[in-house]
Image (cartoon, rainbow, N blue to C red):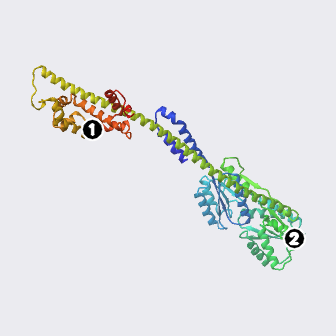
Amino acid sequence: MGSLNIICNFISNFEPKPNVYMKYRPILLTLLITLFLCSCGQEKKKYVIGVSQCSEDSWREKLHDEMDMSTYFYEGVELRYACANDDYKHQMAQIDSLVASGIDLLIASPQQLSTISPAIDRAYDKGIPVILFDRKTDSDKYTTFMGADNILIGELLAHYIMERMPANAVIIEIEGEKNSSPAIDRKVGFEQVIATRPDIKVISMENDNWTEKSGMEAMERVLADYNGRIDCVYGANDRIAMGAKKILQKRNIECSGILFAGVDALPTKEGGMTLVRDGALNVSAVYPTHGDELLQLAIDILDGKKFSQETMMNTSLVTIENAKVLLMQNEEIVRQGNNLRQLNRRVDRFINQIDAQRTLLYLLLFVIVVIAVCMLVATRAYHQKNRLSARLAQEKETVERQRDELEEQRDKLIEATIANKENHGVKETGEDVLTGDESLYREENVFLQNFKDALERHFTDSNLSVEDLADEMKLSRVQLYRKVKALTGLSPAEYIKQSRLKRARLLLSDSSLNISEIAYKVGFSSPGYFTKCYKDMYGENPTHGRR
């Protein structure tokens, strides 16, 4: 919202006059709305969900794929995955790193019941919702649990196997990873049901992990102590069951009469569902991923919606009778998923184009608004400049007129003083008095030429005063007045003004100069006052002299 804050600060600091605010309010509101829309288009609600996996296998890859696809339906959701590769210390460090990165919710699949509980507790204590998925911990610091009912899985497989076992059958049970909740629950469910057939012997073998290799090693240990008849091999997952079968085949033990059972039933190329269809396994229990439901649960928690404290996923058995149909259904799901991904990519491209066009539109609108504001400001400044120029010209005219009036009044005061002296019989002597023939003096007197030369040097000076000329000619103002008046019949102020107007009349014949330029050239600072004086002297406007 940075752009919005800038415009808000601008408006809060902008204190124009009321009429100016009303004049620019539509533009300011348009600019505010434009920046607000741009900000809204860029800032979207976003959830960051961390996913901590204890290991990496095809089952978890399928889960991640389902979760990624589900993000298409939730705008602004980011998934951050971390895999510990069966290293609980590494998983604890990864959880702490996810929390430090700023996740909003944690989905964790612990390796064993107690190994990573401290890290999950730390995340929970910081207020981060925690979903335990697939596996549980020995801590109660979590928000909800989602997973399959592993006890039920063990029971379903036990019922299926028990119905097909002859009297005094021998079952080899190879468990899952030691101390992991799925392995414990599957063993409990399986053995509770098998216990109802006392004639069935179960040989159990603990295991370190869920890999095919661990199944092979476990079967090697079983065969080291037992070499009798085997009617069934029950592996805690499909990979363990297949590992055990490979060891039996390696020992040249006939496997056609042995029932092989596993868990997961993934519909992948080497998954349990395909193995059942192809006869490599006889039965497998579906251990669902349901990544879409997991992400929905996470969003519900973040959105503050109601959710269950425990969500159990349904399961079923895959046998030779239904494996082919289930695989066909999965192929259709995969096909639709690929179509959905392709459609999502197209939608993303379309949205990116729309976002680019929207950004361009907002930018264009912003530029238009800025240009409109600049034009309004420029227009207002232009009109204000014209008003100020007109006012300044008027003030110049007033000052210039008042100055001339003051000069004339001072000349009249000097004339009145001289007349008063003459009325009282005071005879003027010295250089103030003109002698000789006045007409001859008027034509040839050096003084008048010096006065004209001084005036010529300052012709364009609008601030020229009579005192300035008197000082330059080393005379008092009274002396200058008496001599100029005697020689020209005009006071110095009148002589200066008439000289300037006569010069202006000559310049009017030059079409390259406008009236204002002519006024400035002859010493007027106000073209309006020049026009008035010109009309007073010649009885017409200066423009008439240009015809």
Q: Tell me if residue 494 comes above or below residue 282 in the rendering.
A: above
Residue 246 visible to the viewer: yes
Between residue 142 and residue 39, name the one nearer to us.
Answer: 39
In the displayed structure image, the side of residue 75 where residue 166 appears, left or right: right
Give the percent coordinates (x, y) of residue 42. 60, 50
Residues under labels 1 and 2: Cα distance? 135 Å
Q: Tell me if residue 392 comes above or below residue 95 in the rendering.
A: above
1 vs 2, front mark: 1
Q: Quadrant of residue 199?
A: bottom right
Residue 196 visible to the viewer: no
**Which residue corresponds to the image point at 10% horizontal and 21% vertical from the top-left?**
425
Name the image quarter holding the C terminus. top left
> Could you say which disc has been placed on residue 190 in the image?
none
- Residue closest to the far right: 167
Give the percent coordinates (x, y) of residue 224. 78, 78
Identify the amino acid type marked 1.
Answer: Phe
**Which residue corresponds to the image point at 81% horizontal and 76% vertical from the top-left?**
248
* Disc 1: which residue: 459
Mark 1 lies on a secondary structure that is: loop
Mark 2 lies on a secondary structure that is: loop
* Disc 2: which residue: 169
CA neighbours of label 2 inside 10 A, class few (<14), some (14 to 19), many (20+): some
CA neighbours of label 1 inside 10 A, class few (<14), some (14 to 19), many (20+): many
Identify the amino acid type marked 2.
Answer: Ala
In the displayed structure image, the side of residue 322 where residue 398 appears, left or right: left
